[in-house]
């Protein structure tokens, strides 16, 4: 049904005949991370609330519930939908500005060690977007060996709050075999 119709909101119970509500939510999340899901259930064990949080549900109402509670959760879901829409619109404008200005982005999430490498950054080094994985290992592999010590030293100083901003000019190996200076 999810693929056949445009669905704005899913209301579900946990106890269902063919599969559990949690199994259904997992299947939905594999297809659509953004669709709001609210669980309406008589289950009150902490493990059910925790599982709902893990699956990214937008609300959990315990039956019987009051109309005011339901309206409050729907209000929060509507606010979330509006915020996501604004964020998508903003992200599109930022993407257009970055593409138009030929700005390349390398963004490292220190907590998770996840690295975002923009298509423009890859292009600057002579690669197509799908030729390089967005991974820290890719960045390290392409970083000129003679620049590694200074790059990591500056980065560590920044992480230890010894430098307010991290800024570095160093070399990366281009696909064609020469190096490119990058700030």
Image (cartoon, rainbow, N blue to C red):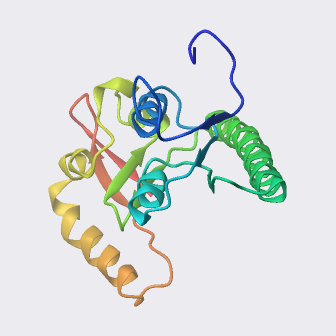
Residue 137: x, y in percent? Answer: 20, 49
In the figure, 70 relative to 165: above or below?
above
Q: Nearer the viewer, residue 140 or 21?
A: 21
Q: Nearer the viewer, residue 71 or 179?
A: 71
Image check: 175 left or right of 103? left
Image check: 6 left or right of 50? right
Considering every residue shown, the one lying at the far left of the view is 145
In the figure, 36 relative to 46: above or below?
above
All told, the count of numbered labels is 0
Q: Would you identify the image quadrant in which residue 91 lies?
A: top right
Q: Would you identify the image quadrant in which residue 36 lies?
A: top right
In the figure, 40 relative to 47: above or below?
above
Residue 81: x, y in percent? Answer: 74, 43
Residue 161: x, y in percent? Answer: 42, 88
Which quadrant holds the C terminus?
Answer: bottom left
Image check: 53 left or right of 112? right
Image check: 177 left or right of 128? left
Q: Nearer the viewer, residue 15 or 86?
A: 15
Residue at x-position 40% and y-position 61%: 109
In the figure, 129 relative to 98: above or below?
above
Which quadrant holds the N terminus?
Answer: top right
Residue at x-position 57% and y-position 18%: 2
Residue 167: x, y in percent? Answer: 45, 69
Considering every residue shown, the one lying at the far bottom of the view is 162
Residue at x-position 49% and y-position 29%: 28
């Amino acid at each position: 049904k999810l693929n056949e119709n445009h669905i704005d909101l899913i209301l579900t119970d946990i106890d269902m005949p063919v599969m559990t509500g949690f199994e259904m939510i997992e299947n939905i999340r594999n297809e659509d991370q953004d669709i709001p899901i609210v669980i309406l259930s008589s289950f009150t064990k902490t493990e059910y609330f925790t599982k709902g949080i893990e699956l990214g549900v937008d609300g959990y109402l315990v039956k019987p519930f009051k109309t005011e509670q339901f309206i409050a959760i729907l209000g929060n879901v509507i606010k979330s939908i509006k915020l996501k829409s604004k964020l998508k619109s903003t992200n599109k404008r930022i993407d257009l500005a970055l593409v138009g200005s030929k700005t390349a982005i390398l963004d490292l999430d220190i907590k998770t060690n996840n690295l975002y490498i923009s298509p423009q950054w890859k292009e600057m080094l002579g690669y197509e977007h799908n030729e390089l994985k967005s991974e820290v290992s890719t960045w390290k592999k392409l970083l000129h060996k003679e620049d590694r010590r200074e790059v990591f030293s500056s980065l560590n100083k920044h992480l230890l709050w010894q430098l307010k901003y991290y800024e570095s000019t160093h070399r990366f190996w281009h696909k064609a075999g020469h190096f490119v200076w990058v700030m």
